[in-house]
Amino acid sequence: MNPKKKRKDRIKRHKRVRAKIIGIKEVPRVSVFRSASYIYAQVVDDKSGKTSLSVNDIKLKDSNKTKNSLQIGQLLGEELKKKGVTKIVFDRGGFKYHGRVKALADGLREAGIKF
């Protein structure tokens, strides 16, 4: 498949989902971006338009990307709990919900975050 079409289709899916979900201060949106090498997640309050927290796996040394994603999810979950957030809206960014995106979500759930 053409890489440009693949990216364009992902962005189209993401826009379709973003039209329906919104994060607020009490229940923020966790937005996920998955590149070929790394995974990034950020906690967004759409009402104020601010990112309150962001994490990525750039500094993790494990060569298994799925394990890194799980660790990032757990780390983000712990940081959210410190801020008093227990419920979120999960935004997979147009990516399929499997592999690294699912591992990040599982890490959040292990940390006690509900969505």
Image (tube, rainbow, N blue to C red):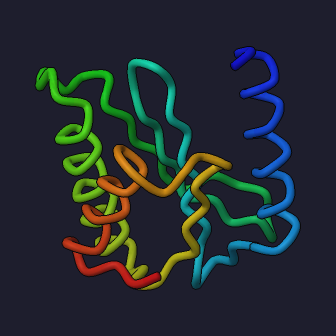
- Which of the 4 image quarters holds residue 43? bottom right
Q: Quadrant of the N terminus?
A: top right
Task: Identify the residue at image location x=69%, y=77%.
Answer: 24
Task: Identify the residue at image location x=17%, y=29%.
Answer: 64
Task: Where is residue 29? Give x, y as percent.
Answer: 61, 67
- Residue 65 located left or right of residue 67: right
Task: Where is residue 69? Give x, y as percent.
Answer: 29, 43
Q: Nearer the viewer, residue 51 or 41?
A: 41
**Which residue is at the far front?**
1
- Residue 46 located left or right of residue 70: right
Does 44 sit above or below residue 58? below
Q: Nearer the viewer, residue 95 or 73?
A: 95
Q: Give the number of marks.
A: 0
Q: Nearer the viewer, residue 21 or 13?
A: 13
**Which residue is at the far left?**
62
Task: Where is residue 33? Give x, y as percent.
Answer: 55, 39
Task: Identify the residue at image location x=36%, y=44%.
Answer: 100
- Which of the 4 image quarters holds residue 9? top right
- Residue 17 located left or right of residue 38: right
- Residue 76 located left or right of residue 1: left
Does 55 sit above or below residue 76? above
Task: Identify the residue at image location x=39%, y=26%.
Answer: 38
Task: Where is residue 16? Give x, y as percent.
Answer: 85, 60
